[in-house]
Image (spheres, rainbow, N blue to C red):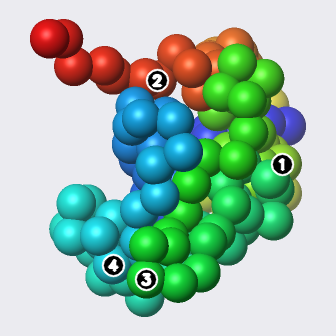
């Protein structure tokens, strides 16, 4: 049986970081400290999330005084599902909302809703490319 999708703060930070870098000038490098200030979180908290995006090849990290994190992928080729998987692993559905192996009634009254929500989230994440997130300022 499938269930509701879990969206964590880690994915939220990954999403916002990627959106920020996709919207920036190509090649822009931003430090973890700066990203923390932009999003109102500690750099230490981001330090748990950003390396996952680096390992997935979505971001690259640069060392040195002008270092930081930079978009390392083609924004047309990477989806939000790729970002989700980099941070959370596979988009798996949660089992029973009450933590039971089986409903007392025999069938779960929420199963269709759970499956619909899971499918819609999966479809949206897999069909949204990073390039779709770009917010360009107009001159």
Sequence order check: which comes first, mark 1 or mark 3? 3
Q: Is residue 121 left or right of residue 67?
A: right
Q: Find the distance from the CA under tag 4 to the CA under tag 2.
A: 23 Å
State the SS at label 2: helix
Which of pointers 4 and 2 indicates the residue nearer the eye? 4
In the displayed structure, 65 sits above or below 136; it is below
Q: Please report whichever mark, 4 or 3, sits nearer to the chain's N-terminal start.
A: 4
- As measured in the structure, the alpha-carbon distance from the residue carrying label 4 to the one carrying label 1 is 29 Å
Marking on residue 90 = 1
Mark in the foreground, 3 or 2: 3
Read off the residue under disc 2.
Answer: 133
Distance between the Cα atoms at labels 4 and 3? 12 Å
First in sequence, mark 1 or 2: give its number.
Answer: 1
Splitting the image into 4 quarters, where does residue 19 fall?
top left
Please determine whether, in this image, residue 79 is positioned above or below residue 45: above
Q: How many marks?
A: 4
**What separation in Å lies between label 3 and label 2 (alpha carbons)?**
28 Å
Marks 1 and 4: in contact by CB < 8 Å? no
Find disc 3 in the rendering and name its residue.
Answer: 65
Residue 52 % position (x, y): 71, 67
Percent x, y for residue 97? Answer: 61, 51
Of callouts 4 and 1, the N-terminal one = 4
Mark 1 or 2, closer to the camera: 2
> In this view of the protein, which residue sits in the foreground, 91 or 138?
138
Alpha carbon of mark 1 to alpha carbon of mark 3: how far? 35 Å
Dot 4: within a 10 Å radius of its alpha carbon, few (fewer than 14), some, or many (20 or more) residues? some
Among the 4 quarters of the image, the one containing residue 134: top left
């Amino acid at each position: 049986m499938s269930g509701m999708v879990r969206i964590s703060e880690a994915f939220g930070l990954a999403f916002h970081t990627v959106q920020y870098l996709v919207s920036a000038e190509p090649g822009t490098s931003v430090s973890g400290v700066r990203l923390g200030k932009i999003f109102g979180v500690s750099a230490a908290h981001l330090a748990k999330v950003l390396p996952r995006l680096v390992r997935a090849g979505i971001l690259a990290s640069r060392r040195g005084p002008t270092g930081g994190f930079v978009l390392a992928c083609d924004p047309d080729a990477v989806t939000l599902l790729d970002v989700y998987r980099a941070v959370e692993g596979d988009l798996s559905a949660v089992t029973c909302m009450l933590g039971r192996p089986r409903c007392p009634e025999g069938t779960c009254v929420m199963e269709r809703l759970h499956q619909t929500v899971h499918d819609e989230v999966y479809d949206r994440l897999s069909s949204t490319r990073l390039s779709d997130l770009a917010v360009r300022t107009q001159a």
